[in-house]
Amino acid sequence: KKIVIVGGVAGGATAAARLRRIDETSTIVMFEKGEYISFANCGLPYYIGETIKDRQKLLVQTVEGMSKKFNLDIRNLSEVIEINRETKHITVKNVQTLETYEESYDELILSPGARPIVPPIPGLNEAKAIFTLRNIPDTDRIKSYVDVQQPKRAVVVGGGFIGLEMAENLHDRGIEVTIVEMANQVMAPLDYEMAAIIHNHLEDKGVQLILEDGVKSFENAGSKVVTQSGKEIETDLIILSIGVRPENELAVNAGLNVGERGGIQVNDYLQTNDPHIYAIGDVIEVKDYINEQPTMIPLAWPANRQGRIVADNIYGKEVKYNGTLGTSIAKVFDYTVSTTGNNEKTLKRLGIPYEVVHIHPGSHAGYYPGAAPIALKLVFDKDTGKIYGAQAVGMDGVDKRIDVIATAIKGNLTVLDLPDLELAYAPPYSSAKDPVNMAGYAAT
Ligand code: FAD
């Protein structure tokens, strides 16, 4: 078998490694248009902020290392520009020489990811120091600008994960940061009252937060950001982090089906409408694990999981991808924000009735130093006890509670089961009644 993979980072590299582990004889060719494969996307903001000091550490695998380790044919700086489904060939462009050539496939895996959205805001092209963050070259550009130009002020447009992580990391570099967000809150997976905790914290840290306001234009070569409401913010640096859109051009041009938001549509086995073409990662539309509606959830866990499953399926193991729960976590200065499943906003939009409990237990026993309250919100169905989702914000122990609840959801446990979870306890870690147990008691 000859298997060709488009995209050599999270989903693509995982699939390649798994394919080789299952079968030693197939030919596996992985194309990556950038220079680097399998780099740590999620670590990029922390390298700019200098928490991660060694750039090498971001490069999880090199082309040479991975080719050798897994006996793969990896071609970086090679962009796949066309798929010919009839002849089962792709066209590849060497991005340095611009030469093109064809390559055949028996099975094709698309994992081209999603790119940052760059809306046509007036003044954007004239702005000198405006950046998006996706890959190593973007990171190098931002880091070297910060190192060399030593900007004093930055505007981060968009208060999602990447925006907030960049706000913190730029702040760590001594830069005064303003976040401009169109919605009435940051971190969309949180409901408003949970996000409000983060709003206060950002302000405590000296980050200026402008909500319910979008960018109208960039003036004076990007040294001034003007908002819809007429606010003017002087700045030395702009980060655009308003979301991503799937890199679906190859698929669309090849006649593969895409959904409303452009995500490639796949079946439970991650197959597109062409049975020899699979798609995984940020580029696909997934089924929401809770409400079963099609959605886009560009996160690393789904990309990795799908990369493994797609390899299994190509070798006939028939493993289903069960949908995406959207479990996520981010560090926002001293706080951890984490969510799993559906929030109230989503359930309301879909007309699904729900019940909510809010609790504020300590992260561990109050008499042992370092305990901090966790704001924990559980969203569930009152009649069946089905857990729809949970959100937690706090300085300690947030990750563990959300992970336990995410596991409970996948195990089909209900709120009635939560008090019965026998969780690890000693004073430095928890209480004899863990916050997850308490959420269960509160809900029943
Ligand atoms: P990618 O990993 O983006 O890989 C796609 C690759 O395909 C790219 O390198 C691209 O150059 C290449 N490509 C595209 N088109 C072609 C073509 N035609 N030919 C050849 N190559 C092509 N997720 C989390 O869960 N937690 C986090 O903390 C987190 N932090 C993040 C921080 C940042 C700054 C970024 C950018 C992302 C972060 N993510 C995080 C998201 C996570 O990185 C993605 O969900 C994941 O990388 C998606 O994997 P993918 O394989 O779909 O796409």
Image (tube, rainbow, N blue to C red):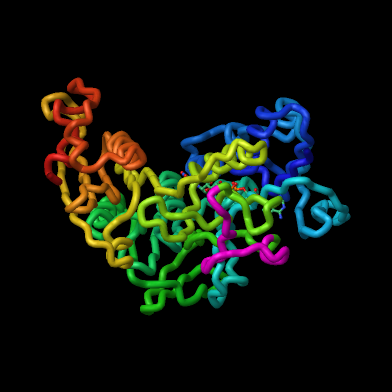
Q: Which residue is depicted at the point 21% across and 43% down?
A: 415
Highlighted range, magenta: 251-268
Quarter of the image that includes the C terminus: top left
Q: Which residue is depicted at the point 45% across and 58% down?
A: 154
Residue 404 covered by magenta stretch: no
Q: Which residue is depicted at the point 68% across and 47% down?
A: 109
The answer to whether 255 appears left or right of 152 in the picture is right
Residue 328 location (% of width, % of height): 39, 46
The answer to whether 89 appears left or right of 180 in the picture is right
The answer to whether 216 appears left or right of 371 in the picture is right
Nearer-the-camera pick, 175 or 134 = 134
Residue 335 location (% of width, % of height): 30, 43
Q: Which quarter of the picture shows residue 29? A: top right
Nearer-the-camera pick, 331 or 139 = 331
- Residue 179 appears in view: yes
Quarter of the image that includes the N terminus: top right
Nearer-the-camera pick, 238 or 195 = 195
Residue 221 location (% of width, % of height): 57, 71
User: How many numbered markers are drawn?
Assistant: 0
